[in-house]
């Protein structure tokens, strides 16, 4: 509906019309006129975007190729953006849907099948292999689901939509630059509804910053080269501050009359301080004897599950800023201990 408002604003010079005005106008203006207005608004937006892309030194040929089959924003993508599971599912349901017997079994198989590559990558980047494989499993079920949406169309839709237009506009420029400099062929630009690409589901900016040619074949391929997928994942975490002498954290039990103002990533205390506050492991045992700092996370608020998390949890959040996502990856990684 926001795009219809912006369209109508072409004559009103405002993008903040009230719902009452919108309803009144729709009673007297034919639907075809609104559709035409919407098409004109998108065409104008796309023309302005192409001017910006040319300023970023993206070639006209790349723009012509990238937008040759683009007819307009895809409503399905906007709808999916509004109902992301991170916004709509409980922690229990979110984790259960992603950490199931099949994914655990397949992950253990991958740990064995790619143990040589994982060993090399683990040593080079200092990231434990169980976390690399867990991210791979959560993001694409070990490469089974990489997405079939045209990345340019997905990013264009979200850049035009308005909810996070600034972010997706930048990602669209990044994607066009990857095509323009020959890093990624246009036909390979397939991914998720949000524009994430390959088996590790990198956004274009993440691809540019973190994707690596782990198998040393002269190209970076996170779509079909498992070594490149694993190496790129590890490189991302390493540059996000990963520490291989730590785990991610642990579920804990809180005492009665706990001070919930301490909940949140902004509060960092040594484990010894959490111990003195009455925080314990879920089995009632004492916390590890360490001065390592931790924060208390409670995704569902007071009364819900509580987790003491370390710096590696923050690295997972840099990948996806959702506590539910990070806890799903952490939970799956715990299933790989000793494998």
Image (cartoon, grey):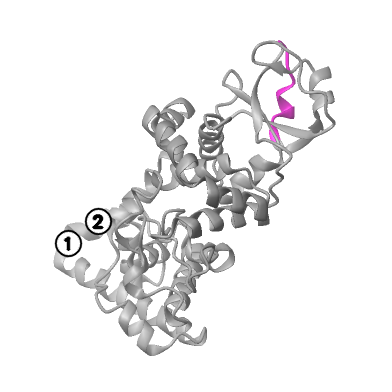
x 38%, y 50%: residue: 143
Element at label 2:
helix
Q: Picture coordinates of residue 109 (x, y %)?
A: 43, 38
Specify start and end residues of the magenta stretch as a single range: 256-264
x 31%, y 77%: residue: 67
Q: Picture coordinates of residue 338 (x, y %)?
A: 58, 30
Q: Check the image and report above or below for 41 versus 17.
A: below
Q: Check the image and report above or below for 119 versus 263.
A: below
Mark number, residue 192: none
Residue beneath disc 2: 24
Q: Check the image and report above or below for 63 versus 70.
A: below
Residue beneath disc 1: 28
x 33%, y 55%: residue: 147
Q: Check the image and report above or below for 72 versus 22.
A: below
- Residue 235, quarter of the rendered image: bottom right
Q: Picture coordinates of residue 316 (x, y %)?
A: 60, 45
Instruction: Check contact, mark 1 vs mark 2: CB within 8 A.
Output: yes
* Residue count near mark 1 (Cα–Cα under 10 Å), binned few <14, some 14–19, many ≥20: few
> What is the CA distance from the residue labelled 1 to the residue labelled 2?
7 Å
Q: Quadrant of the C terminus?
A: top right
Residue 111 falls left or right of residue 9: right
Q: Quadrant of the N terminus?
A: bottom left
């Amino acid at each position: 509906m926001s795009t219809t408002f912006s369209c109508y604003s072409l004559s009103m010079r405002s993008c903040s019309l009230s719902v009452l005005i919108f309803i009144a106008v729709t009673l007297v203006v034919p639907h075809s006129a609104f559709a035409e207005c919407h098409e004109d608004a998108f065409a104008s937006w796309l023309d302005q975007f192409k001017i910006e892309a040319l300023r970023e030194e993206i070639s006209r040929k790349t723009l012509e190729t990238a937008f040759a089959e683009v007819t307009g924003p895809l409503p399905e993508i906007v709808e999916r953006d509004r109902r992301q599971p991170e916004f709509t599912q409980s922690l229990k349901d979110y984790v259960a849907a992603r950490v199931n017997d099949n994914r655990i079994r397949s992950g253990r198989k991958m740990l064995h099948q790619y143990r040589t590559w994982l060993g090399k990558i683990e040593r080079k980047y200092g990231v434990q292999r169980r976390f690399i494989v867990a991210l791979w499993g959560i993001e694409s079920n070990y490469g089974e689901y990489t997405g079939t949406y045209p990345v340019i169309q997905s990013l264009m839709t979200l850049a035009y939509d308005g909810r996070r237009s600034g972010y997706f506009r930048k990602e669209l420029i990044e994607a066009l630059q990857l095509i323009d400099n020959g890093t990624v062929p246009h036909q390979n630009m397939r991914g998720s509804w949000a524009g994430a690409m390959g088996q590790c589901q990198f956004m274009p900016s993440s691809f540019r910053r973190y994707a690596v040619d782990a198998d040393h074949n002269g190209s970076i391929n996170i779509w079909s080269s498992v070594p490149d997928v694993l190496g790129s994942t590890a490189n991302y975490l390493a540059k996000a501050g990963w520490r291989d002498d730590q785990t991610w954290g642990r579920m804990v039990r809180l005492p009665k009359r706990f001070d919930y103002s301490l909940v949140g990533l902004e509060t960092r205390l040594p484990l010894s301080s959490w111990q003195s506050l009455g925080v314990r492991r879920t089995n009632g045992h004492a916390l590890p004897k360490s001065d390592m700092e931790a924060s208390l996370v409670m995704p569902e608020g007071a009364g819900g599950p509580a987790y003491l998390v370390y710096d590696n949890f923050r690295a997972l959040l840099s990948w996806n800023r959702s506590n539910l996502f990070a806890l799903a990856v952490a939970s799956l990684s715990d299933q790989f201990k000793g494998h």
